[in-house]
């Protein structure tokens, strides 16, 4: 065709076609990379969130392990305290039993001495026999003396309010204690008696003892 308008229109169409192709190509290129960027960003975000979640999970596991350790340690301490409490209870029961034995022993000893003293007093009051038994009560005995406790017969007063006689021979002496102590005679003469402790079951500093003398 020789018409100028035809060529002009043809060139315009070709120009538009070229522009459209370029635009579509550029748009397609940036669109693909934009989608890839979205995928990369999504992957990064997912990885970051997963890492944070794992860190929180590890922190929770650590706290659970610490709690388990504290619970086990607390249980061990409870078992230890229960064992100590049982040991203390056993010791208290043993102490109470020992105290009861001592109390019963002291009661029997006191009752025995009282009965014997009453019999002697009854015999003396009736003048049935010549008095040859003498009882001295509540003598103060100082505990833990290194040289023992020495008592002179001239200083002792009997239950009847009399002084001890001057013995011609070494008398027979019986000891009775009422404060949980056990004594033995370390020295005995016609004028005095020295006592020492063989075993002590009291915290007292001074104990009271009773002596019964018999002429040989």
Image: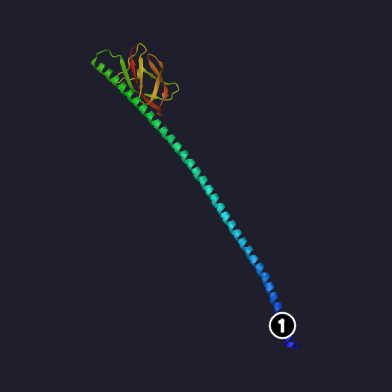
Name the quarter where the N terminus is drawn.
Answer: bottom right
Q: Where residue 200 sits: x, y (%)?
A: 41, 25
Position of residue 40 relative to residue 143, above or below, is below
Report which residue position mark 1 lands on: 12
Quarter of the view holding residue 173: top left
Q: On the rendered structure, is 43 left or right of 124?
A: right
Taking the spot 51% from the left edge, 46% from the top edge, the residue there is 68
Q: Residue furthest left?
A: 126
Q: Where residue 57 sits: x, y (%)?
A: 55, 53
Name the quarter where the C terminus is drawn.
Answer: top left
Q: Residue furthest front?
A: 1
- Count every numbered label the image shows and give the total: 1
| Along the line of sight, the residue nearer the viewer: 130 or 25 | 25
Taking the spot 51% from the left edge, 45% from the top edge, the residue there is 70
Badge 1: how crowded within 10 Å, few (<14), some, or many (20+)? few
Q: Where residue 51 sits: x, y (%)?
A: 59, 56
Quarter of the view holding residue 178: top left
Taking the spot 36% from the left edge, 27% from the top edge, the residue there is 101
Secondary structure type for disc 1: helix
Q: Where residue 146 sits: x, y (%)?
A: 45, 22
Quarter of the view holding residue 136: top left
The reply to whether residue 160 is in sight is: no
The reply to whether residue 115 is in sight is: yes
| Along the line of sight, the residue nearer the viewer: 131 or 79 | 79
């Amino acid at each position: 065709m020789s018409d100028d308008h035809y060529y002009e229109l043809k060139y315009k169409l070709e120009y538009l076609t070229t522009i459209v192709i370029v635009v579509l190509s550029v748009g397609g290129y940036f669109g693909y990379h934009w989608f890839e960027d979205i995928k990369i960003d999504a992957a990064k975000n997912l990885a970051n969130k997963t890492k944070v979640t794992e860190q929180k999970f590890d922190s929770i596991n650590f706290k659970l392990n610490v709690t388990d350790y504290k619970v086990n340690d607390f249980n061990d301490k409870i078992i230890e305290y229960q064992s100590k409490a049982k040991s203390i209870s056993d010791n208290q029961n043993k102490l109470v039993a020992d105290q009861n034995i001592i109390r019963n022993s002291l009661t029997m000893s006191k009752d025995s001495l009282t009965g014997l003293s009453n019999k002697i007093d009854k015999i003396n009051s009736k003048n049935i026999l010549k008095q040859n038994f003498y009882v001295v009560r509540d003598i103060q005995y100082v505990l833990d003396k290194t040289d023992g406790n020495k008592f002179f017969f001239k200083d002792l007063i009997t239950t009847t309010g009399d002084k001890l006689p001057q013995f011609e021979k070494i008398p027979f002496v019986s000891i009775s204690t009422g404060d949980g102590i056990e004594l033995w005679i370390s020295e005995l003469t016609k004028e005095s008696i020295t006592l020492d402790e063989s075993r002590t079951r009291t915290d007292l500093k001074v104990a009271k003892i009773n002596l019964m003398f018999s002429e040989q």
